[in-house]
Amino acid sequence: MSTLGIICYQLERNIGKITNMHELSVTESILEIALRHCKQAGASRVTDIYLVIGQLASIVDDSVQFYWDMISQDTPAAGTCLHFRRIPVELECKVCGQRYSFTGDDFSCPSCTMLDFKILKGEEFYLEAIDVED
Amino acid sequence: MARTIHIIENILNANDELAASNRARLDASKVLGVNILASPGAGKTSLILRTIEALSKDVSMAVVEGDTAPVTIDADKINALGVPAVQINTGGQCHLDAVMLQAALPRLNLDALDCLIVENVGNLICTADFQLGTHINVLIASVPEGDDKPYKYPAIYRGVQALIINKIDLLPYVPFDMAYFQRGVEALNPGLVTFPLSCRTAEGLENWTTWLSEQALRNRPG
């Protein structure tokens, strides 16, 4: 590889590291949970993983998949299919009880215009189930 | 045979458990842990330096510095003020996590401290998800970043116990609608204690340092 090639390669690796490390830590956690439950169940292989992620959680599906393919190699979870269930944001107005979602920067209630709500859905971030083979 | 195992486990469970153990370690030494969050350039290091200058006579402090690169610029500035600083190099990772803080704690004499300030990596996204075990998460928003940040980064505004609006000396020069900004904050985190200030001119700084000092000394024995 030429010097320029080496520099570009190194740069690519570092940029990859810096911009995507968040998903890497998250992906490692997913792998740890899945393998632990696979072992506890006495199964030999994980085939599917079901993730539930609220819209407010800052996770990019493609990045998780990318890291998954890297870190699950040589584990009983290699080649697993990841399923992402995205949960839309749902708010409940504390004033009039209206349930609603929001777009852009308007969090106010479409019914009474008040800005006083609790978040019912959209902050989920958990692993729901895995499919395994014995 | 293929079968489904139902789990329902928080993906960041392992981090949360370690964060709880960090919290217990801080509590055992009666140390207030403060996690400083902000985007790059909002004034994390400046705020820490001004806070040390104002409080270090009365409040025994140390700082854990999170940096993505192995540069000790920030830690050097803190050491120069006579306060111990431990550097954590995240190796490119965009946030501190509970494992990294756990590794840093044994490098400090916690029993001698009232307050441990953790300077997180400059980032408004990932830092919101990874709890460290600190008692107070403080977010610094700065005027030049714009007034729309609560709307664009709602998660971090929901997870903090105090908000600093830094660089208010720039308000005459920068379009920043304070009412619009605060409306977003109030919706996401009602009643959030907020300190508008300028690290450069020191305007408003005393409100913050007085508040922090009260929090830190509340647990001091005797």
Image: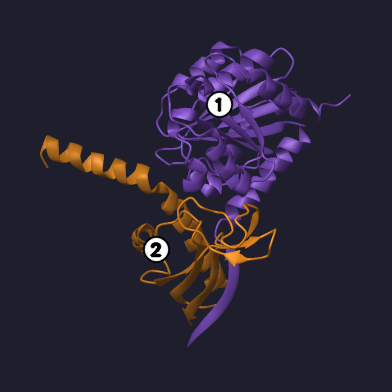
Chain colours: A orange, B purple
Amino acid on which disc 2 is placed? Ser
Instruction: Inspect this view and state whether residue B185 appears.
Output: yes
Residue B173, horizontal then vertical, whole percent: 43, 22
**Residue at position x 74%, y 15% from top?**
B58
Residue A5, horizontal then vertical, whole percent: 14, 40
Task: Say if labels 1 and 2 share a chain.
Answer: no
Q: Quadrant of the C terminus of chain B?
A: top right
Marks 2 and 1: in contact by CB < 8 Å?
Answer: no
The CA distance from mark 1 to mark 2 is 34 Å
**Residue for badge 1:** B86
**Residue at position x 71%, y 36% from top?**
B26
Badge 2: few (under 14), some or many (20 or more) residues near its Cα, within 10 Å? some
Q: A60 and B5: which one is in front?
A: A60
- Dot 2: chain letter: A
Badge 1: few (under 14), some or many (20 or more) residues near its Cα, within 10 Å? many
Q: Residue furthest front?
A: A112
**Residue at position x 73%, y 31% from top?**
B31
| Residue B144 falls left or right of residue B13 | left
Q: Residue furthest bottom?
A: B1
- Dot 1: chain letter: B
Q: B148 and B86: which one is in front?
A: B148
Q: Residue furthest right?
A: B222
Residue A105, horizontal then vertical, whole percent: 48, 50
Amino acid on which disc 1 is placed? Val
Q: Quadrant of residue B109?
A: top right
Q: Quadrant of residue B80?
A: top right
Q: Which mark is residue A72?
A: 2
Residue B65, horizontal then vertical, whole percent: 53, 28
B145 relative to B98, above or below? above
Instruction: Inspect this view and state whether residue B40 appears.
Output: no
